[in-house]
Image (cartoon, rainbow, N blue to C red):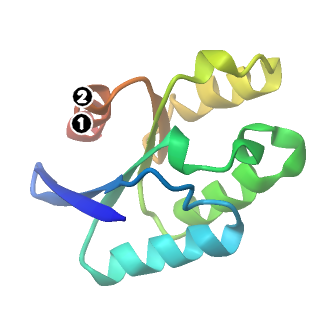
Amino acid sequence: MRIETHNINGKKVAEIITNEIILRTTEDGLDLLGNLYYQGFDKIIIHEKNITPDFFDLKTKIAGDILQKFTQYEMPLVIVGDFSKFKSKSLGDFIFESNKGKQVNFVNSQSEAIKTLTNG
């Protein structure tokens, strides 16, 4: 796993670069959050391919549990990916509602992630 650092509006943003799935459980989320916070990061970008597919099945509650930790510890998170492949209406609604706020956002590209964090 490599961390690419972006400096946006005086904030240190970590973009996770890997081909591995690194977010499978709430514990994985807490480990990532703690690790990056300890390294002085203020915000995180992670790619959908690095998150277990179960995250996107809201019935598993993995998404809610993980995202609650990022919200609780006030660490903004942007998830980059093609979410159109997930046909769940409830997931679509969840993404729509999340994108209204500034804590957790779902975007289609890395450039959109940077833009979201610049405005947030």
Whether label 2 touches label 1, CB < 8 Å: yes
Q: Residue at x 57, y 74 (%)?
A: 30
Please report the residue visible at 58 percent of the width from the left and 67 percent of the height from the top.
29
**Mark 2 Cα shell of 10 Å, populated few (<14), some (14-19), many (≥20):** few
Position above or below: 45 against 97: below
Residue at 77% across / 16% down in the picture?
87
Q: How many marks?
A: 2
Crowding near pointer 1: few (<14 within 10 Å), some, many (20+)?
some
Q: Nearer the viewer, residue 45 or 21?
A: 21
The N terminus: image quadrant: bottom left
Q: At which x and y percent is residue 85? A: 66, 18
**Above/below status of 103 relative to 36:** above
Instruction: State the mark number for residue 22.
Output: none
Q: Is residue 33 above or below residue 7?
A: below
Q: Is residue 59 left or right of residue 28?
A: right
Report the residue marked by disc 1: 114
Kindly give the residue lying farthest to the right in the view shown: 59
Indicate left or right for 1 with 119 as reference.
right
User: In the figure, residue 27 lies in which quadrant?
Assistant: bottom right
Where does residue 78 sit, x and y in percent of width and height?
A: 42, 43
Q: Determine the secondary structure under disc 2.
A: helix
- Amino acid type indicated by mark 1: Ile
Q: The residue tagged with tag 1: helix, strand or loop?
A: helix
Placement of the C terminus among the 4 image quadrants: top left
For the residue marked with disc 2, what is the amino acid?
Answer: Ser
Marks 2/1: CA distance? Answer: 5 Å
Residue identified by numbered label 2: 111
